[in-house]
Image: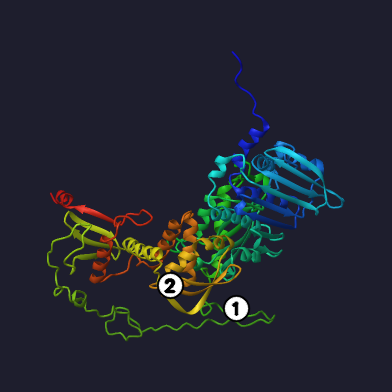
Amino acid sequence: MSDIIHLLPDSIANQIAAGEVIQRPASVVKELVENAIDAGATQIKVYIKEAGRTLIQVVDDGKGMSETDARMAFERHATSKISTAADLFNLRTMGFRGEALASIAAVAHVELRTRKPGTELGTRLTIAASDVRETEADVCDPGCSFSVKNLFFNVPARRKFLKSNEVEFRHIVNEFERVALVNPQIRMALYRDEMELLHLPETTLRQRILNVCGKTLQQKLLPVDVKSSLITITGFTGLPEASRKRGAMQYFFVNGRFMKHPYFHKAVMQAYENLIPAGEMPDYFIYFTLDPAAIDVNIHPTKTEIKFENEPSIRQILLAAVQGALSRSGALPSIEFDRQGAIDIPVYTGEVQPLKMPDVTVNKDYNPFATNAAPSTAARRMPDFDWAKLYKGFENEQKPEPTDAPDADELPEETFHTCYQYKAKYILTSIKSGLVVVDQRRAHIRVLFDQYLSRIRGKKGVSQQTLFPETVEFSASEAVMLPAILEDLHDAGFDMEHLGNNAYAIRGIPAGSEKLNPVMLVKNAVNQAIETGCRAPDEVSEAIALSLAKATAIASGQKLSVDEMNALIASLFSSVSSAYTPEGKRILSILSDDELIRRFK
């Protein structure tokens, strides 16, 4: 019987490895930009065409490679970063496995042009599906220029499952921003279809954050700076009043590397406990610096999941650091001495001063048990209160007349006193089969969502012009989504004018939202579209309609009149889907007559 186990060819092994390392065009950008940083680049330019499907080009001015190094770099596990297993626990570079270039070359056409500073000629190398096609001397600038074309051309299944260009390019922007936020000393630029989208000069960390995430954060960032023998934590955290339900910018970095860490995220959220409304998230940009031997980055191909040796201790330091930043801003109470009640400490002049007993004024005639004491000295009495007023009107209040209750899908014929509000959160009304309990906010979201969606699809949005135009500035990732939703924003009632770069003037907002902040209204609509990953026109319309519905719906806890409750219930029952919100949350619960009878047996 012949043997059946055999070694895979390198080309197939590299394609398998590429499935772990290169998941989408953004993965290529991440790996190539990190390589440029490791090469000591002071300037990095990234060119993207068709969201990376056609071209991903990364140009840097780093130390470049010789011809031999250029060929070796595309071999699997070829690296200049580590030599022994012990080096894995002393990593100070972004890449180290030697898998990235081999994985990229296995699933794309790659051209590398590179030259070491001080040499006259460089090297041009072309590879397709791990096969070296051409190597020749080349006249090029110092550094490296990687051009990755036709990504996944030999893996059609992988190419088929790529998302739309807007979604894929947004992932590219996210990866670019993560690298930019931790390397303010490097000049960086991002181009999309030959148009410059981001230009980031060399600057300070705070200014880099503002350049990437928008100048609206200028007055909303609080510095975080704590140093200990275990770890150094620096960066910025947002003011509590700047928190938001979606689109919050939250970044952790460790030793110059972006990471995701739910355990540390909970520590930051704990610092904001009781300072921000439930469901809202603060912005934060937190940078950890510690001994590389105390962390393990070699647990995931993308290196975004990192293990820490002393996680509980670091968590406590992080919590104290964020709380300290909030305390210094006045968001958290701090211990301060009352200036008026402080002790006046005399200045020492060298002369002996005679001691003087303090004067204490005591009213010897004060009697706390006296009933006729003067108002200034007698104990305070409880204010007079007419408790009868508390029940005034209750006896004369008209009781609702019994009426025939409608089914859940029918409008009630009698609308006077058919509803009752419970704890300003729920509306109780009757139907033929029993009692209905309705969540008033969710019901209003459902009704408004249907109305906004109908306006957008019918292009009948009513715009209310603002008295003074408001300026909104989008981050790069938000700006990527705008072209896909601008028409729907207009149909919903937004009147926006492009001011250049990523800034827009808001001249009109949907009717009915006049009391809301126009900037936050637009931002929430964009971020709702980003979160839902809109891939089709219908999804874009629904995302905008949902965002507007949430923003303009009544709050849970708002008192409603009987007429308002009746109108809301009537609108809800006429909806095509009255049981659930657009997000799938339950709106109403029915307590049947049979269950009521069982409860009272």
Instruction: Decide if residue 210 is on the left or right side of residue 357.
Output: right
In this rendering, the label closer to the viewer, 1 or 2? 2
Instruction: Decide if residue 215 is on the left or right side of residue 368.
Output: right
Give the number of marks: 2
Place of residue 443 in the rendered image (x, y in percent of width and height, measured from the top left): 31, 61
Please report whichever mark, 1 or 2, sits nearer to the chain's N-terminal start: 1
Question: Label 1 sits on what residue type?
Answer: Ile
**Mark linked to residue 276:** none
- Could you classify mark 1 by the number of other residues whose Cα lies within 10 Å: few (under 14), some (14-19), or many (20 or more)? few
For the point 35% across and 62% down, the residue is 450
Instruction: Decide if residue 78 is on the left or right side of residue 392.
Output: right
- Could you classify mark 2 by the number of other residues whose Cα lies within 10 Å: few (under 14), some (14-19), or many (20 or more)? few
Contact check, label 1 and label 2, Cβ < 8 Å? no
Q: Is residue 533 visible?
A: yes
Instruction: Decide if residue 423 is on the left or right side of residue 430.
Output: right
Q: Please, what secondary structure does the residue beneath circle 1 have?
A: loop
Place of residue 447 in the rendered image (x, y in percent of width and height, measured from the top left): 32, 63
Q: CA distance from mark 1 to mark 2?
A: 52 Å
Q: Name the residue carrying label 1.
A: 345
Q: Please, what secondary structure does the residue beneath circle 2 have?
A: loop
Q: Name the residue carrying label 2.
A: 516
Seen from the viewer's position, the closer of residues 202 and 362 is 202
Q: Is residue 6 above or below residue 171?
A: above
For the point 61% across and 43% down, the residue is 152
Q: Which quarter shows the N terminus?
A: top right
In the picture as drawn, the residue positioned furthest to the top comes out as 1
Question: Label 2 sits on what residue type?
Answer: Leu
Place of residue 388 in the rendered image (x, y in percent of width and height, measured from the top left): 18, 77
